Amino acid sequence: MVLSLVMASCAPKVVEKEKVKEEEKAVVTKKVEEVKVEKEVVKPTVEVPKYGGELALSAVMDPIIFDERGSPFHANAYTLQLTNEELVIGDWARGPAGTGEADFTLTVGGFRFITGCLAESWEIPKLGHIIFHIRKGVHYALNPNSEASRLVNGRELTAYDVATTLNEYKTTPGSAASYADFVKATVTAPDKWTVDIQIPPQYMEDISVTMDYASICAPEVWQKYGSMRDWRNSVGTGPFILTDYIAGSLVTLSRNPNYWMKDPVGQGKGNQLPYLDGVKFVIIQDNSTRLAALRTGKIDVLHGITWTDAGSLRNTSPALLEKKYYGTGGMAISMRTDKPELPFSKKDVRRALMMATDFETIKKDYCGGDAQILTWPIIYQKEYADAYLPLEEAPASVQELYVYNPDKARQLLKDAGYPNGFKTKIVCTFAGVDYLSIIKDMWAKVGVSLEIDPVEVGAFTGITAKREYDQMIFSGAGLVANLYIMETLRGHIAFGNLSHINDPRCEEAYTKMCELSVLNPTEANRVHKELMSYVLDQAWAIPYVTPASYNMWWPWLKNYHGESDLGRSNFPKWARFVWIDQGLKKSMGY
């Protein structure tokens, strides 16, 4: 299911990185409190923060679960991002409010742009072993009107809660932690404030994935109530408390008066968070109704607005602020390269399909002239720019794939043994039919007959997760944030490697990146970029021409710069840092 949540100036600080001397096999320790001044890239807002007000967001569906057991990737458990917390969080001080190193408009993962949340610090004695030091003084929120909350009674969170939660997620089918190699990890709490995780070194990066898909819960709530599908059982340490829920209509959260976090940067540095009195999610399934809600000030921010709708909003509501970005991760036409009886097992066929695709025309006519074309296996993202190979830096054999050349495509098909082309079939959701219809017409010109087979979202999710399709599929290629596990190019990860690639050069690069991603991500990025010259030349997938998308918001929403995530799919963790200028809102007539 697709979830769309619609919803200054002190010297910034960033986490100090200790130099690791290989000859000493030094312990790598990240301490949240140890900071240094970095050059400021983006000037933060100068307004003094104000307490009070309610942030109005929009969701396209009801929240149906209030922990992450059996709930992959936060899709239907979005209130957790405000009521519960994880070991780490995206480092707000390194985003637009601080140094500007990160945009946080797309999902960010790994160890580069995070800081401690429930984990105050951590150390890595060696690859495959990480020790988290749990923050003291963090208490579960106490809601006197909630039986489950009274059961926990505002007690202090401990390492035992963290270890129990991680093990529960790891062993529950359907949880995000159960999909990846984190299932091979051993998680223990040797004392009240320490969580020890050991995992085979080649799967080290999966710890960073799990840190972002594991909202910590109070075990006694599970023990008493079992299922977490009743919102009244929601109990956490987050900045807000879930206080009311009307199915199909409204979700209401109130400020946690005993929240621990302080504002890390800007004019409000050191202030107690959150600034808001509350957050509400207005449940709106219809896109035009969501746009109207933003236009009329019923909601304060809306994410994932198309370029056409953004143009309309600029005309009707010129006071809206905006942030442009491209997609959420490379969609692509993937194909079964593992079946020797299929045309896609031949490199010339795959290259022919690339040359039969007029990417520039799609960009001009379908995307309004503003789009990214080279979006597979990763889309360009500021936080991972050093891992991305721009087309102009690619070898000539790669560059020619992105130039429309039906004559050469026909010749390549002939050379591969398909002088008259061939028939094939692609599975997609109904949302993909229009785009694929364009592809179908283009490929027909070189003799390739494409049958489009749309299915409902639920069925499509199952097909994608199990990689059960006969020939081709139009689906997401994977988050850029999962760069270092190379889920697009190798292995049997659920939802990953949709072209069924099994290539020794990819495996070799993966091994190198696993060794580097935690201790030296800059070098890991270099390895990935170097590999791209080879990967793109293989044409294992046809990239989706990704149009511009926009986050748009009203100017009374302060200390907000268009952020979507603070980690992997962490909507809207940024709410703890923003405030509402109620005077400005009133003066604008809302």
Image: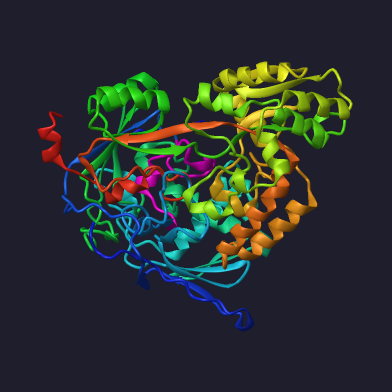
x 65%, y 50%: residue: 486
Q: Nearer the viewer, residue 51 or 333?
A: 333
Q: Quadrant of residue 414?
A: top right
Q: How is the image coloured?
A: rainbow
406 up-or-down from 11: above or below: above
Q: Quadrant of residue 489?
A: top right
- Asked if residue 525 lies left or right of residue 421, the reply is left
The answer, for residue 183, to whether it is visible in the render is no
Q: Nearer the viewer, residue 175 or 569?
A: 569
Give the percent coordinates (x, y) of residue 457. Answer: 56, 25
Give the percent coordinates (x, y) of residue 157. Answer: 38, 61
Q: Nearer the viewer, residue 315 or 20?
A: 315
In the image, is residue 195 part of the stretch drawn in magenta?
no
Query: How many marks can you see?
Result: 0
Magenta stretch, residue numbers:
65-88
- Asked if residue 504 lies left or right of residue 64, the reply is right
Residue at the limit of the structure toward the bottom, as seen here:
24
The answer, for residue 407, to whether it is visible in the render is yes
Prevalent SS, magenta region: loop
Give the percent coordinates (x, y) of residue 355. Answer: 71, 29
In the image, is residue 67 part of the stretch drawn in magenta?
yes
x 83%, y 34%: residue: 346
Q: Quadrant of the C terminus?
A: top left
23 up-or-down from 267: above or below: below
Give the percent coordinates (x, y) of residue 470. Answer: 76, 27
x 39%, y 60%: residue: 117
- Asked if residue 123 lies left or right of residue 553, the reply is right
- Asked if residue 538 lies left or right of residue 144, the reply is right
453 up-or-down from 485: above or below: above
